[in-house]
Amino acid sequence: MKFVASIVAALAIGAVSCRVLPDGSEHASPGGLSTEALALLRPYLKELIAASNAEFDDRGVFLGASPHRRTADRLFDELLGSESRPGDEAIAYLLFIYTGEHPGEELICEAARRGKVMVPLIEQFSARLPKTGLEPYPKFVLGSGTLAPEALSRIASGERCEPYD
């Protein structure tokens, strides 16, 4: 019964309403995220939100590092290393979330490295950001809207970033 309630709740928020694509992957309703992309994103976003909530007060004053930050950083690195369509979706999605200054630059670089395959995803998410089921996001996680245009510009120009150490 608990499982059925979870599925009903997920359908109600739009996190799950899948169809199978020709390549065999499941994809949420048009404009949504695949179940595989959600599986990459949700654990990271949960830790990012927990870290942000613990590290900042309501005015944005830094209170100190949270243990959630280390987990979020590890999950972010795993997400960047996901060389797949769901990984592409996750990278494109995160261009609209504030992940931090350095991670934001890494997202732009990774989108540029992945190239033109990212353009339709970024444009699709620019028009309507899919739901993850974790909304509404705290104000310190909401993106500024500057990463996606920068990523599109770098993709169009063929510009690549220097690797980070």
Image: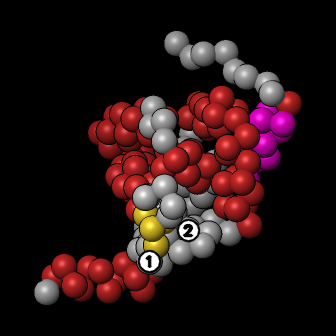
Is residue 38 visible in the rendered structure shown here?
no
Q: Residues within 10 Å of mark 1 (few under 14, many from 20)?
A: some
Could you tell me how far apart the alpha carbons at marks 2 and 1 are, in whole angstroms?
Answer: 9 Å
For label 2, the residue is 32
Left or right, 119 with reference to 28: right
Q: On the image, which quarter does residue 42 sit in?
A: bottom left
Q: Residue furthest top?
A: 165
Judge whether 88 appears above or below 158 on screen: below
Of all residues, the one furthest to the left in this rendering is: 1
Question: Is residue 150 shown in magenta?
Answer: yes
Q: Residue at x 34, y 83 (%)?
A: 9
- The percent coordinates of residue 110 (x first, y second) are 61, 32
For the stretch drawn in magenta, the main secondary structure is helix
Question: Where's residue 88, x and y in %?
Answer: 56, 45
Amino acid type, callout 1: Ser
What residue would you read off at disc 1?
17
Q: Find the magenta span and give its range.
A: 144-156
At x 37%, y 39%, the residue is 75
Q: For residue 162, which numbered disc appears in the image?
A: none
Q: Earlier in the sequence, mark 2 or mark 1?
A: 1
